Amino acid sequence: MPQGKPAGVPCIQLDDDLQCRIFGSPLRPACCSGLQPQADMCGDTREQALVWIAQLEAATQPGAH
């Protein structure tokens, strides 16, 4: 996404199963390949991980500071 990924908008590289189409590819952006998931990010369920991501996106929206 040349202009960046707006908060709340799925990455254009996600397929219908929410899997990254370019995982492992040199085309994968550094912001993705450099992310090191931690237990507090992932939680115990997919729903917990999605809550964490939603909070991160809300905190990083322009004007959120």
Image: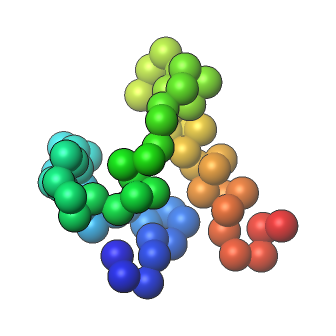
The x and y percentages for residue 36 are: 48, 35
Lateral position of residue 42 relative to residue 15, left or right: right
Q: Residue at x 77, y 76 (%)?
A: 63
Q: Nearer the viewer, residue 29 or 21?
A: 29
- In this rendering, the answer to whether 62 lies above or below 34 is below
- In this rendering, the answer to whether 27 lies above or below 25 is below
Kindly indicate the quadrant of the structure image that contains residue 45. Answer: top left
Lateral position of residue 21 relative to residue 6, left or right: left
Q: Residue at x 44, y 47 (%)?
A: 34
Can residue 19 be seen by looking at this rendering?
Answer: yes
Q: Nearer the viewer, residue 11 or 32?
A: 32
The x and y percentages for residue 56 are: 63, 50
Q: Nearer the viewer, residue 22 or 6?
A: 22
Picture quarter with the C terminus: bottom right
- In this rendering, the answer to whether 59 lies above or below 2 is above
Kindly indicate the quadrant of the structure image that contains residue 57. Answer: bottom right
Can residue 15 be seen by looking at this rendering?
Answer: no
- In this rendering, the answer to whether 43 lies above or below 14 is above
The x and y percentages for residue 20 are: 23, 50
Lateral position of residue 33 relative to residue 64, left or right: left
The x and y percentages for residue 29 are: 35, 62
